Image (cartoon, grey):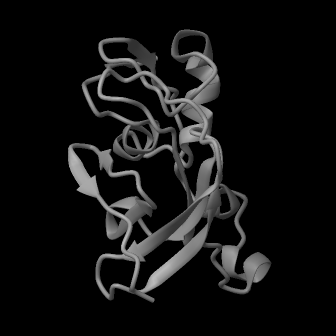
Amino acid sequence: MPIYKTKRNDDLRTIASIFKLPSWKYLYQINRRIIGDNPDLLPEGIDLEIPEWDSTSGDEKIREKGVSPFQYTGGLRYAYPWNPVSITLTDSDGNQIEDFQESRPFKVFSRHTGEVIIEGQIQSANEFRVLLPGDENDFEFGIKDLPLKIKGELHLYRENEQ
């Protein structure tokens, strides 16, 4: 298996994407013993095992049998446009922050349109898990009264925007 040494601000989703893996969760399961219980807190400088992955669509194997994949699928292709995003809130030293005394509102905004995609309440530092239509870099995240720094970029809660 190939090995990848993690760098500062790496996350499993990006690493999985680099190696064309279908999900960061598969990468996490293989490396869970070295990563620990929280996949959002990826230590810098660890060696991750990168699994080999067959990224074919399966059509090649059907053609090997002498039949048309179109006959079996009707030309349909499956797509999963919504991607899971998980963020654990940490202090500047990388330690998970304490849970909040009271729940706080959060919003996720589209960087392209400014539209609020998702909003809700958060109580715990490790419960920020959402499904987003596209890549997490297309969005801004905001938690009321808590400036966020994600991959070196400041994210603020915007009160008056829809």
Does 123 sit left or right of 13 as displayed? right
Which residue is nearer to you in this view: 162 or 68? 162
Q: Position of residue 17 (x, y in %)?
A: 40, 47
Q: How many marks?
A: 0
Does 121 sit left or right of 89 as displayed? right
Q: Is residue 141 above or below residue 27?
A: below
Does 71 sit left or right of 119 as displayed? right
The answer to whether residue 101 is seen in the rendering is: yes
Residue at the image point whose x is 56% and y is 30% from the top = 98
**Residue furthest front as drawn:** 101
Q: Quadrant of residue 32?
A: top right
Q: Is residue 23 above or below residue 73?
A: above
Residue at the image point whose x is 56% and y is 46% from the top = 23
Residue at the image point whose x is 61% and y is 10% from the top = 33
Q: Is residue 70 above or below residue 40?
A: below
Q: Position of residue 53 (x, y in %)?
A: 53, 37
The answer to whether residue 68 is seen in the rendering is: no
Does 68 sit left or right of 79 as displayed? right
Residue at the image point whose x is 63% and y is 42% from the top = 101
Which residue is nearer to you in this view: 34 or 93? 93
Which residue is nearer to you in this view: 117 or 137? 117
Q: Is residue 93 above or below residue 79?
A: above
Q: Position of residue 39 (x, y in %)?
A: 55, 30
User: Which quadrant of the figure contains the C terminus?
Assistant: bottom left
**Residue furthest right as drawn:** 72
Q: Position of residue 34 (x, y in %)?
A: 53, 10
